[in-house]
Amino acid sequence: MASKIKVDEITTVSETGNLVIPGGVALDGSQATTAWKIPKGTDGERPAATGGELRYNTTVNRLEFYNGTEWFQMGPPPFDLYDDAYFDAFIGFMAGQKTSWASSGTNYQYQTDASDTYISDAQSDMYDGGNYTQIRVNGNASGDIGYNSNSGTYSQIKYGQLGYSWPLVSIAVAPTGVSKTYGYSRSGNLGADGGGGSVGSITVYNNATVQGFNPVSAWLVNKAWNQNSDPGVMHLYCTVGHPNWQSTITNGFVTTDFSTSSNSDYSQYQSTSTSCFQMTVLVSNGQTVGAMTQGQAQTFISNFLADAKTHFGY
């Protein structure tokens, strides 16, 4: 039977700085209430190894060991949001948080009044059958999605909505580890009757880090407002990755398009990404207030991702 050494601390090291444990001796930490401290560092700080070495990789936040040929990461795989159980749990959690994402006093709580696929005529005749939303994959569109619907799939893209109430939000995800070009589009008649403010778009984030998520790309379209007492209509689109998922965004804005007519609710956003998720939301800056700013859109996304961070335990 091998001998055991039980001590509070070992400080003796070899001339190379390595701790030397005699053959046949085992370390027993079973009586401790703390934790072993092992070497850690980024991918780029990996040491020259011969096999059997163990360290904590701070790039992906996982344990790894060298098997003599390559570094092998241990523990569960990166979070697989494409799995039904994980995705449904995320949708369920975020549905309970969505009314807290807008910055106070800047994003108007519009009404919803029709089928869960669109807004018909709520609040000062602004919507007139607008805000239909579709999933888009490589330029092709799904049918209109319902905001009270359970999760669905279109051309391998899984999507789920957070309920038919302000703000209207949908989240979509592609198979983990697969590069896909996908996103959302909107259509319909806003009811601005030829009036309203000037239509335009804003790049909100481009490969940014937000609440620890990276890369993050986001785009905002300001549509119609200031038509008597009509509330503003804005379309927000976002692609989100995380270092733990080994995410990449090849092109955060591979397709962006919108109608310059204040009546038309048309806009389209697609990005090309791997191991990311996408979000779209119908936001508003209030009645007769005007366009939403980049800062207001950033606040919404930051609040959204703060709750996502809590859900994922990051």
Image: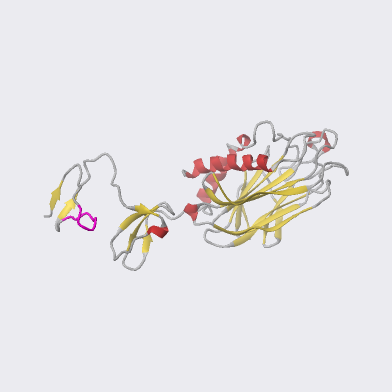
Residue nearest the viewer, comparing 81 with 239: 239
| Residue 161 relative to residue 16: left or right | right
Q: Main secondary structure of the magenta part?
A: loop
**Whether residue 72 is visible:** yes
> What segment carries the magenta color?
13-21
Q: Which residue sits at x=22%, y=44%?
A: 30
Q: Quadrant of residue 22?
A: bottom left
Taking the magenta stretch, the answer to whether it contains residue 239 is: no
Q: Which residue sits at x=35%, y=52%?
A: 40
| Residue 299 relative to residue 211: left or right | right
User: On the rendered image, what quadrant is the N terminus found in?
Assistant: bottom left
Q: Quadrant of residue 143?
A: bottom right
> Which residue reaches farthest bottom?
69
**Whether residue 79 is visible:** no
Instruction: From this view, report whether residue 22 is shown above or below residue 210.
Output: below
> Which residue reaches farthest front?
15
Q: Position of residue 175 (x, y in %)?
A: 55, 59
Q: Position of residue 200 (x, y in %)?
A: 77, 48
Q: Which residue sits at x=71%, y=48%?
A: 202
